Amino acid sequence: MSEEKKQTKAHDEFNKMLDDWDFQVPQIGELVKGKVITASKAEVKLDIDGVLTGVVRGPELYEEDDDYANLKPGDEVEATVIEGENENGELELSFKFAGQERAWQGLFDARDNKTNIKVKVVDANKGGLLVKYRQIPGFLPVSQLAPENYPRINGGDKGRILEKLRSFVGKEFTVRLMTLDEKEDKIIFSEKEAWNEKQKDIISKYKVGTIVEGDITAITDFGIFISFGENLEGLIHISELAWQRIDDPNDLYKVGDTIKAEVINLDNSKIFLSAKNLIKDPWSGVEEKYKVGQVVEVTVLKVNPFGLFVSLDDDIHGLAHISQLNLAPGQKIFDLFKAKEKYEFTIVSIEAKEHRLGLSYGKETDKKEEKTEKTEKAKKEETKTEKKED
């Protein structure tokens, strides 16, 4: 065979091989797969189907996805074409774009399958935490934090709340996706929903009436939170702390105290407790101790525009409505009564089952004093008469 025929045959065979091998040169924006040839902090080179070489450099390197961190020769990864051919005849590739596509797909999967994902806290404001899922920013509102991370600050001091939120910067939270709107660039996460799902089986072990013991984790103006069991948290509302009226839970408890309580309500992941249910009701048999019409010395606990809260003893408290205070025209309740001062009142009603006791000031007491004065006066007149007769 002549040399010319050999060349023609070889050319035909090469063209046939090209026809049989359906290789298409990747276009800008296309996602390609390649095997790592070399990897450094400066660049990563990929072999694309044994035909082309691609390079990922500088800002296009992406380590927020596990697939792109700590790459080594032989690893297979995906990248996005950002330039057809550079000065070295290589494809310019980006892990960043590919990573973003994977991240969005991860968000869509988490939404559709209702699965938990992890986000990293990058900043905080008064409304919540600024977080990132890989490189995609989102928001975690304060109201959607799990109980253990919720900033329960007594008095609701906004500065201290923000300080607490900022302490989470750099940490990872397990969350559930609440809102995903790619067009509006609105992504909202919930740590509480993820926590609720995790705690369902644990909470199911508890029933109304179960007695628990735990440590106080937070004290607020509306009650106290205690931690018990397997990382559970419950609320004892201020009205369930004791049988008597409590103005400030801080007067009775401090963070770290151990307390027993009874489960009184379970609302999904919310557990409501009562401490007073474990204490004997002091109102039981109160009619044997106090009677309607009885004059008692009380201590004013609080002065309100509508009346006075008073204590008859350590356990029994009552209310003297403003209509029962015998105020003179123009006289103000705050001018006549002071907290912590003692006064004499008359019991006008007792409702033991409702834990209510009503009192009055002035009218009934004045009548009793008036009756006493009349009796004393009559006795004196009678004594005078007897002496005259003698």
Image (cartoon, rainbow, N blue to C red):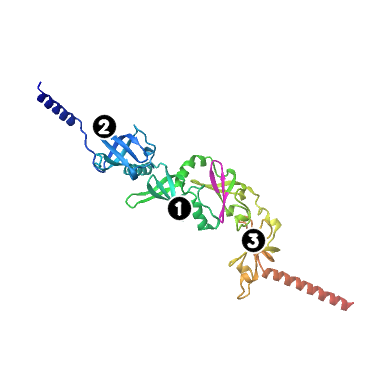
Q: CA distance from mark 1 to mark 3?
A: 46 Å
The residue carrying mark 1 is 124
Which disc number belongs to residue 207? none
Where 54 falls versus 315 (above or below)?
A: above
Crowd rating for badge 1 (residues with CA inside 10 Å; few <14, some 14–19, many 20+) = many
Q: Amino acid at mark 2?
A: Gly
The residue carrying mark 2 is 50
Q: Residue at x 49, y 42 (%)?
A: 199
Q: Amino acid at mark 1?
A: Ala
Q: Amino acid at mark 3?
A: Gly
Q: Nearer the viewer, residue 213 or 45?
A: 45
- In the rendered image, residue 45, in percent from the top left (x then y), is placed at 31, 37
Res 294 visible: no
Res 340 visible: yes
| Upstream in sequence: badge 1 or badge 3 | 1
Q: Quick check: 92 left or right of 154?
A: left
Span colored in magenta = 217-234
For the residues carrying marks 3 and 2, which lies nearer the camera in this image? 2
- In the rendered image, residue 346, in percent from the top left (x then y), is placed at 68, 65
Q: CA distance from mark 3 to mark 2?
A: 89 Å
Q: Quadrant of residue 212?
A: top right
Q: Principal SS element in the magenta part? A: strand
Verify CB contact (< 8 Å) between mark 1 and mark 3. no
SS category of the residue bearing label 3:
strand
Where 285 falls versus 92 (above or below)?
A: below
- In the rendered image, residue 122, in percent from the top left (x then y), is placed at 43, 49
Q: Quadrant of residue 299?
A: bottom right
The residue carrying mark 3 is 318
SS category of the residue bearing label 1:
strand
**Quadrant of image for the C terminus:** bottom right
Q: Is residue 331 magenta?
A: no
